[in-house]
Amino acid sequence: DQGAAAADYNASLRLNAQYDKAYIGRGELYRRAGRSNEAFNDFQRAIRLDTTDPRAYHRRGLIYQERGQHDFAIDDFSTAISLQPEAPEPYRGRAVSYIAQQKLDNAFDDINYALRIDDRTAEGWAIQALVLEQRGENAQAARAYRKALQLDADYDAARRGLARVGGA
């Protein structure tokens, strides 16, 4: 229950306003609820309290990305990567921002690295497919979209992408 979780985070922060992990947790709840300004503020506070937690940078990067502020998003994803290079999520996030900036070689490098770390997410394969599609490599894109759909048969973005490249 998100309401109960938010109440727990609020209670934790009343007891200790310096508890950075509570800001990260509450911020993620806000982000998932579409309350991005409140989430952003919580991630900012968490970063001010602890500059070494990659989760705060990654999640703030997602908000920058939602806002179309891809340079800031890339900076945050890069910081998260430097703090936890074995986590695939910031590489996927940075790849999406690189795609938005049409830096397809950078995006391809990042998503392939993320897939080497963890190739069991439909999102990773769909991002790779999108890069391949934008590079005009439709046969390879279709294979990656199919892989995404094998992992998550309900992944609409992969289904639409597969249709675009003529693989459906």
Image (cartoon, helix red, strand yellow):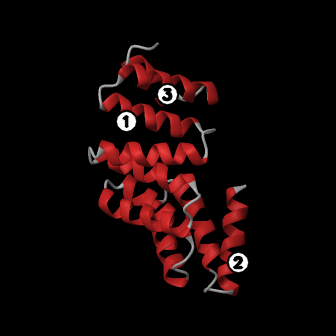
Q: Could you tell me residue 73's position as x and y percent?
A: 38, 60
Quadrant hosting residue 127: top left
How many numbered callouts?
3
- Return the disc, 3 or 2, that comes first in the chain's sequence: 2
Looking at the rendered structure, the secondary structure element under dot 1 is helix
- 5 relative position to 52: left or right: right
Of labels 1 and 2, the one closer to you? 1
Label 3, label 2: how far apart the Cα atoms are = 45 Å
- 163 relative position to 103: left or right: right
Q: Which mark is residue 144?
A: 3
Closer to us: 27 or 46: 46
Residue at (54% x, 42% y) in the render: 115
Q: Which mark is residue 131?
A: 1
Tag 2: amino acid: Ala
Q: Is residue 128 visible?
A: yes
Q: Could you tell me residue 107's position as x and y percent?
A: 37, 46
Tag 1: amino acid: Val
Residue at (47% x, 30% y) in the render: 157
Whether pointer 3 and pointer 1 mark residues with C-beta atoms closer than 8 Å, the reply is no
Closer to us: 35 or 71: 71
Residue closest to the far left: 102
Q: Which quadrant, please, contains the N terminus?
A: bottom right
Closer to us: 10 or 64: 64
